[in-house]
C-alpha cells in the first residue's frame, strides 16, 4: 500500500468550483501505472470528515488510512486491489461517528441487497458502431419513434425468482427484433443508474456512475448499446438529476455534513421520499454534469431524458412556490456544456410545467433542451379520443 501518485490539482479545483464535466476521470477507483506496475488509485471528496479509510475485500475489510489533500479530497493508491473486488470508504465524521459509504463515483456496485462498490475498469472496450455514430444527429428532420421500457420487467424469467432479470445479452436479440418489427427508431431505457429497490424502476438513485448490477457488467451494457447501434437503433437513458435515495450507504450526509443535499432540513426532502440535490453547492453541479457526460462518453447513449424537470424550474414543481433559480442555473449551464461536448446527443425534458423556452437554446434565454415530453398525451389526449365524436365538443379543454 502506498500514498500514491500525484493528482491533477487544476482538474480537482475546477470540479470543486462547479466547472467540470469530467469528475469521473479524477474521482472513484482508477487504474494507474507506476514503475511498470498497475495500481488502483481511490479518490473521494469528503471535506468535513475527520478521517477517511479504505476498506474492501482486498484488505479483509480492515481500514487503510487515506491521505487528505488541502482541498478536502482523500486519496490512496495501492497495487493490491484488483478489478471486480468490492470496497467502501470508512468515514469518521466530525463528531466521531463511524460510517461505511459506497463510492459516489464507483463504476460498479454489488448486487442488491449488498451495498458495496465494485472496482470496474471501463477502458479497453472496442466499439463497432463507428458508422452509426458518424451519422447520428438530434433527429429534427428525421422520423423518430421511441419505445420506452424498463429493462427489468419488459421480459422476466420467473416473477418469484430473485434472479428473474434478463441480462443485457439475453435482452438484446428479442428486443432489437421487436423494435425493428414495430418500426421504432429508438429505445428509451428507464434509469440504469444503480438503485437499491427493484420496485422503484430506478428513479431513486444510489450510484450516479454505476450501471446497475441487475442486468450484467458495464462491458455487457456497452455491448448491448453497440448491438443496438449496429442494428440502426438509438438508445436513450432516463436520468434523475433532482433527487437521490435516502439509504445510509449512499449520498445523504455523506461525510457527516449535508454535502449533496440542502443544509436547511425544511428544503432537504422531496415529495417522493428522497433527498433533493442542493444546486447552490458548486461541486453538486460538477457531480451531476459529470454523470451526464459520463453516460454519453463512456456508454455512447444517444439521448438523455431528464426526469422531473418541473421541480428544477419551480420549487416543489409548483409554479405558486416560485422559481427555483439554482435549478434553472443547473439546467442552463449543464445543457450548454452538453451541447458543446456532445452536439449530436438529444436532451429531452420530462416537464409538466408551462414554463417558456424549455426547448430554446441557452444563448437565446432558453433551458437548452431539444425536446419536451407531451405529458398530456397519456391522459388528456387519449381521454379526449376515448370520447364518442359527438361528445368531444364538451372536452376540448383536454
Image (tube, rainbow, N blue to C red):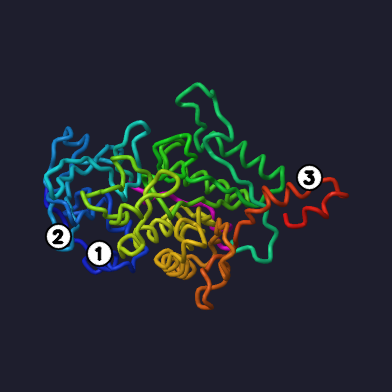
Compare marks 1 and 3 and give the one earlier in the sequence: 1
Provide the residue span drawn in magenta. Answer: 121-135
- Give the residue displayed 33% in from the left and 44% down from the top: 120
Write down the residue under mark 2.
69
Q: Which of 372 and 123 is in front in this view?
A: 372
Q: Alpha-carbon neighbours of circle 1 within 10 Å: few (<14), some, or many (≥20)?
A: many
Q: In which quarter of the image is residue 178?
A: top right
Q: Do we see residue 207 in this rendering?
A: yes
- Give the residue displayed 57% in from the left and 72% down from the top: 360
Residue extending farthest to the bottom is 364
Magenta region's main secondary structure?
A: loop
C-alpha span from label 2 to label 1? 11 Å
Is the C-beta separation of discs 1 and 3 under 8 Å? no
Write down the residue under mark 1.
12
Residue extending farthest to the top is 160
- Give the residue displayed 53% in from the left and 24% down from the top: 159
C-alpha span from label 1 to label 3? 56 Å
Compare marks 2 and 1 and give the one earlier in the sequence: 1
Asked which secondary structure carries label 3, the reply is helix
Identify whether 113 is placed above or below 275.
above
Give the position of the N terminus as an image quadrant: top left
168 horizontally vs 375: left or right? left
Q: Alpha-carbon neighbours of circle 3 within 10 Å: few (<14), some, or many (≥20)?
A: few
C-alpha span from label 3 to label 2? 63 Å
Amino acid at each position: 500500500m502506498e500514498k500514491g501518485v500525484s493528482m491533477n490539482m487544476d482538474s480537482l479545483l475546477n470540479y470543486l468550483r462547479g466547472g467540470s464535466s469530467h469528475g469521473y476521470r479524477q474521482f472513484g477507483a482508477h487504474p494507474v501505472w507506476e514503475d511498470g506496475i498497475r495500481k488502483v488509485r481511490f479518490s473521494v471528496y469528503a471535506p468535513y470528515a475527520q478521517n477517511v479509510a479504505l476498506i474492501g475485500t482486498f484488505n479483509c475489510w480492515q481500514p487503510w488510512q487515506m491521505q487528505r489533500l488541502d482541498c478536502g479530497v482523500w486519496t490512496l493508491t495501492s497495487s493490491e486491489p484488483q478489478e471486480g473486488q468490492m470496497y467502501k470508504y470508512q468515514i469518521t465524521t466530525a463528531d466521531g461517528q463511524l460510517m461505511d459509504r459506497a463510492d459516489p463515483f464507483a463504476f460498479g456496485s454489488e448486487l442488491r441487497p449488498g451495498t458495496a462498490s465494485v472496482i470496474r475498469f471501463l477502458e479497453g472496450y472496442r466499439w463497432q458502431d463507428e458508422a452509426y455514430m458518424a451519422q447520428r444527429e438530434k433527429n429534427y428532420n428525421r422520423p423518430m419513434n421511441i419505445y420506452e421500457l424498463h429493462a427489468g420487467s419488459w421480459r422476466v424469467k420467473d416473477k418469484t425468482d430473485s434472479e428473474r432479470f434478463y441480462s443485457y445479452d439475453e435482452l438484446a436479440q428479442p428486443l432489437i427484433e421487436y423494435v425493428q418489427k414495430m418500426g421504432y427508431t429508438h429505445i428509451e431505457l428507464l434509469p440504469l443508474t444503480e438503485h437499491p429497490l427493484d420496485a422503484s424502476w430506478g428513479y431513486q438513485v444510489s450510484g450516479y456512475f454505476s450501471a446497475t448490477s441487475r442486468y450484467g457488467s458495464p462491458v455487457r451494457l456497452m455491448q448491448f448499446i453497440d448491438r443496438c447501434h449496429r442494428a440502426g437503433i438509438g438508445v436513450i437513458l432516463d436520468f434523475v438529476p433532482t433527487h437521490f435515495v435516502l439509504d445510509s450507504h449512499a449520498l445523504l450526509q455523506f461525510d457527516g455534513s449535508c454535502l449533496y443535499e440542502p443544509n436547511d432540513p425544511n428544503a432537504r426532502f422531496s415529495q417522493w421520499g428522497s433527498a433533493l440535490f442542493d444546486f447552490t453547492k458548486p461541486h453538486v453541479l460538477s457531480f451531476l454534469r459529470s454523470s451526464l457526460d459520463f453516460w454519453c462518453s463512456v456508454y455512447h447513449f444517444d439521448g438523455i431524458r431528464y426526469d422531473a424537470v418541473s421541480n428544477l424550474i419551480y420549487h416543489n414543481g409548483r409554479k405558486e412556490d416560485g422559481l427555483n433559480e439554482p435549478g434553472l442555473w443547473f439546467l442552463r449551464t449543464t445543457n450548454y456544456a452538453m451541447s458543446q461536448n456532445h452536439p449530436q446527443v438529444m436532451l429531452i425534458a420530462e416537464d409538466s410545467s408551462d414554463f417558456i423556452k424549455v426547448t430554446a437554446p441557452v444563448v437565446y434565454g432558453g433551458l437548452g433542451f431539444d425536446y419536451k415530453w407531451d405529458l398530456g398525451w397519456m391522459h388528456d389526449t387519449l381521454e379526449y379520443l376515448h370520447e364518442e365524436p359527438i361528445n368531444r365538443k364538451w372536452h376540448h379543454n383536454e
